[in-house]
Image (tube, grey):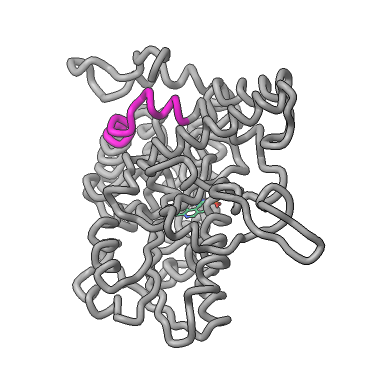
Amino acid sequence: MGMVENTIIKKSAEKGVLDINKIRKDFPVLNREVHGKKLVYLDNAATTQKPRAVIEALVDYYSNTNANVHRGLHTLAEEATSAFEETRSLTAGFIGAEEPAEIIYTRNATEAINLVAYSWGRKNIRKGDRIVLTEMEHHANLVPWIVLAKETGAELAYIPIDDNGCLDLDDLGNIITPNTKLVAFMQMSNVLGTINPAGEIIEKAHKRGAITLVDGAQSAPHMPVDVKSLDADFYAFSAHKMLGPTGVGFLYGKREILDRMEPFNTGGEMINEVRYDYADWNDLPHKFEAGTPNIADVIAFKPALEYLNNVGMDAVREHERELTEYALGKMLDLGFVKIFGPTDSAHRGGAISFIVDDIHSHDMATMLDTRGIAVRAGHHCAQPLMKRLGVSSTTRASFYIYNTREEIDEFIASLVEIRRYFSNV
Ligand code: 7TS
């Protein structure tokens, strides 16, 4: 990573892939206490914490640059524009896009998926067409298609999950029918942790002539991703789940598809020529970026990507795999924890959904919080999946590069105490 010295990856003789103590020093929030206890942040699937470099980039931008992009000819505007576009190039490289213009800035992964549903979907999906999703989708990759299907008269079909929380692909050839226009699915589940075989699904979809959209909100932050070798047509993800600021998301799309699409929002910045009765569109990526974008947060995402590149996504994945294996082993050993999703760390990421006896997930999360442990409880924006699993909610612990085995030990000890507390009441 150019000038950034790579001291984060440990030498192979040492235990663990990453020098976690060094990493933890880069995240100011990890020093704080919650209810008098040291924070144990296990809600990374919701959003991750930010390294100092990201926080400083925000302050630096507003302190020293702050100008609108792509329109000014003064020094500040030129600096802002070039930093804004540098993030785009780095993002393109991070996911293996052919060129930066294939990366569209959005507010989040949700907006990226909606962009496809509106701009591509409303032009290409007709009555009788099929949209294939999976039973494990987040509402972000579900509701836009439910709305589109309702508007157009298209039908929705779902790739089922098996009892292990993995996609059952046995019947994929029949689910992706010749009238299927779109196959949209998550690469990694925010609830089950499952890593789906994206390449295989994309290949099957393409054989039927369907377009594919990969919801990478949980995968891009946690494993190496290469959209070109996947051959994904669209790929959506969010900066805030990968060390970056909130308010920035990305839609990757193949140029030949994006070029044929109509804009999503219209107004300034996205036009080529406007007359009182006419408008045509700017080139990619600006065609899809109407109005003043989230300049500061885009610029502050660059150090987040540099941080991940410096650690290396293979090392990120391996650290989380080890941590997940450790946590799953300990949780299963307790004998009273029901885990949803695969228990083999090779096929899953670090989001672990669970329930303990009949303790409500909200009670569990509240009790963990009193011990300084942050987890999420609820339906995790996957209500149909909850129904499929036969529960109304789960508690979820999810890991990232700064989490340690000691934190998992504290989490496990807390589960034991909380269960004892509730069974005594
Ligand atoms: N897709 C998946 C798989 C997600 O996990 C999320 C957010 C989104 C899309 C939407 O991302 P956004 O940045 O547009 O909001 N998932 C979660 C979660 O699991 N807990 O909080 C947010």
Please tell me whether residue 309 belongs to the stretch shown in magenta. yes
Task: Determine the residue positioned at 35% across, 54% down.
Answer: 187
> Which x, y percent locates residue 259?
49, 58
* Residue in the foreground of this view, choosing between 339 and 179: 179
Q: Position of residue 377 (x, y in %)?
A: 51, 53
Magenta segment: does it hold 147? no
Count of residue discs: 0
- Quadrant position of residue 7: top left
Percent position (x, y) of residue 414? Answer: 43, 39
Residue at 39 percent of width and 74 percent of height: 181
Asked whether 415 or 129 is in front, the reply is: 129
The image shows residue 243, relative to residue 119, as above or below, that is above
Query: Relative to 78, does residue 215 appear above or below in the rendering?
Result: below
x, y percentage for residue 44? 47, 40
Q: Is residue 153 shown left or right of residue 322? A: right
- Please give the range of residues in magenta: 305-319
